[in-house]
Image (tube, rainbow, N blue to C red):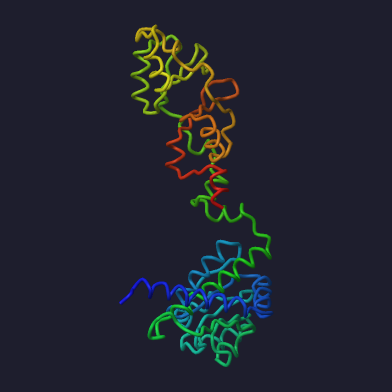
Amino acid sequence: MDLLKIAKETFQIEAESLLSAAGELDERFLEALELISATQGKLIIAGVGKSGLVGAKMAATFASTGTPSFFLHPTEALHGDLGMISRGDTLLAISYSGESEELVKILPHIKRFDIPLIGLTANAGSTLAQYADVALSIAVVKEACPFGAAPTTSTTCTMALGDALAVAMMQKRGFKEEEFASFHPGGSLGKRLFVKIKDIMRRDALPIVGEGEKLKDAIVVMSEGRLGSVLIVDSREKLAAVLSDGDLRRALMRSDFDLNAPALLYANKNPKIYTDSNLLASEALEIIEANRIQMLVITHSDDTIAGVLHIHDLINAGIKSVHLTKEKA
C-alpha cells in the first residue's frame, strides 16, 4: 500500500474541489455578504457534528476580523440558548444534507423572529435551503475518504467558503491591519504594532557604576547584572559610557590593560541610546540589529538612565523586526 500516494491523492481531490467551488461562486455569494454587512447585531453560526466544528472555526475567524460572531449549537438552542438570538442578528446555518434534525428544528423559530438566514448546504431542495434567505452550495463531487463517508473534501470546501466570506467582509468593511492586531494583542502582529519599549525595558537593579569605579569592580557588577554590560554614570547620574563584554575582551589585548584602572578608560563613551520609550519594540529591534549591538540604553531627556532594552528581552517577548515581518509577508 502506497500511503504517500494516498496522501497526495487526498490533496489533489480537495484542491480540485476547491477550484471547482471557486468557479461556481455567483451573485448568491454577494447576497450573503449583503446580509452579513447589514447585520446590526451578531452573526451567529450553527451546525451539528463536523459542520459544527467548521462553524466554530468560522465564528472565530469572523469575530477576529471585524464581524461580531459566535457559534451556537442547535441542540443547546433547543434547550434555552435560542434566547441568545435576537432581532438584528443573522444566522448562518451549515448542514451538508440540509436536513440535520437538530438544526432543522430551530429554523421555524428563527424565521418567526424574522432573523435573516444564510444556509450552507449541498442540497438545493433541502429544508435548510427552503428556509434560507440565501442558500450557498457546499456540494462536492467526491469525498477524499475512500468510502465516501467521512466528511473530508466537503468540510474543506465549507471552511474555504467561510474564509471567503470573512475575507470579503474584511475588504468590504475596510478592515485594517491595526484593527486585526488590536484583536490579537498576543500575536506577532499585535506585538509588532502595539508593544513599546516602555512595556518591556528593564528599569530595576541595573548594573550601574560611577565613572571612577575600578575595572575589576565594574566586572563584578557586570557579572551580577547578567546583561553582558555595565552602565557608567557621572556624578550627576548621567550616562557617561557603557562597558560591554566585547569592550572588556578588546581591553585584554591592550598593552595598558590594568584591572585597577578606571573602567571608563576601556568603555564606549558614545553608546547607542534612545530617549523615546514610546518607540515600538519592533523598531527598537531594528536599531539594535542595524548597529550590531545587544543592548539599547533608554535615557531621560536629561541623559539620566530610564532603563535598558536587551535583545534577549525582545526575543523572549516574541518581538520581530519590521523588515523581517514584511519580508515574510
In the depicted structure, whether residue 179 falls above or below residue 5:
above
Quadrant (top left, top right, bottom left, bottom right) of the N terminus: bottom left
In the depicted structure, whether residue 296 falls above or below residue 239:
below
Direction bottom: furthest residue: 125
Left or right of residue 214, residue 29 in this image: right
At 52% from the left edge and 37% from the top edge, which residue is drawn?
285
At 54% from the left edge and 46% from the top edge, which residue is drawn?
192
The location of residue 26, given as percent across then percent down, is: 67, 79
Left or right of residue 201, residue 26 in this image: right
The part of the image, by quadrant, that contains residue 129 is bottom right
The location of residue 181, given as percent across then percent down, is: 57, 53
In the depicted structure, whether residue 17 falls above or below residue 274:
below
In the depicted structure, whether residue 16 falls above or below residue 125:
above
At 50% from the left edge and 90% from the top edge, which residue is drawn?
99
Foreground of the two, 101 or 8 = 8
At 42% from the left edge and 16% from the top edge, which residue is drawn?
209
The location of residue 314, given as percent across then percent down, is: 46, 39
Left or right of residue 74, residue 63 in this image: right
The part of the image, by quadrant, that contains residue 206 is top left
Foreground of the two, 129 or 109 = 129
